[in-house]
Image (cartoon, grey):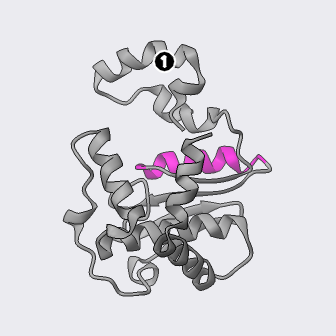
Amino acid sequence: MHSPIFYPFLKKIYIYRKQLGIKTIFNTIGPLLNPGNPKNLLLGVNSLELARLYHYIYQNTKNNYAIIHSLDGYDEISLTSDVKCYTNNGEKYSYKEELNKKQIKINIEELKGGKNIKDNIKIFMNILSGNGTPTQNEVVLINSTFALNLLNNNDFETNYDKASYSLKSGNAKIVLEKLLNL
């Protein structure tokens, strides 16, 4: 969630933070101040130290969580490196080869974001509209599978199949559109 929408005082300082061009304490505490107070949380971080910090904090809550860090610095499962995942059950190391069960050849160039928010929205909507590349689709599906693993007791393959169906059928896009129209 974009915090300035929910916290008026953050909207005032957002402009100054953006002008600074560096990360501030708000980047770190933001996920801890989530106004939705979710009971299930999939959080991606770009730093192993931050992943550990969040794990230490969340392990003392009743939240069902997974904190993801790709070892090459992505704040999501990128399939370009191995992944550390911290959950209520401890930490787990996953090799990119075991996560990429479909053995899709990952093209790093296809994972680069746009130059601005508008470009990123276009890329994301393109993927949800069924026009993503195999690399983009696979990264979305693996991250979606991890999110589903938080919500149910199904095995990885079953949740992957659910995510795949949702993306291919257009249901994922429909759900996003409903959320945006709330």
Residue nearer the viewer, 73 or 106: 106
Number of numbered discs on residues: 1
Pointer 1: what residue? Answer: 11
In percent of width and height, residue 63 lies at 75, 51
Q: Which residues are magenta?
A: 46-61
Instruction: Decide: is 37 above or below 139.
Output: above
Residue 154 visible to an observer of this rendering: yes
Q: Residue at x 47, y 12 (%)?
A: 12
Q: Quadrant of residue 89?
A: bottom right
Q: Residue at x 53, y 53 (%)?
A: 176
Quadrant the N terminus occupies: top right
In percent of width and height, residue 143 lies at 49, 65
Residue nearer the viewer, 123 or 104: 123
Q: Residue at x 62, y 83 (%)?
A: 158
Q: Is residue 53 magenta?
A: yes
Instruction: Decide: is 33 above or below 85.
Output: above
SS at mark 1?
A: helix
Quadrant the C terminus occupies: top right
Q: Quadrant of residue 71?
A: bottom left
The overriding secondary structure of the stretch rendered in magenta is: helix
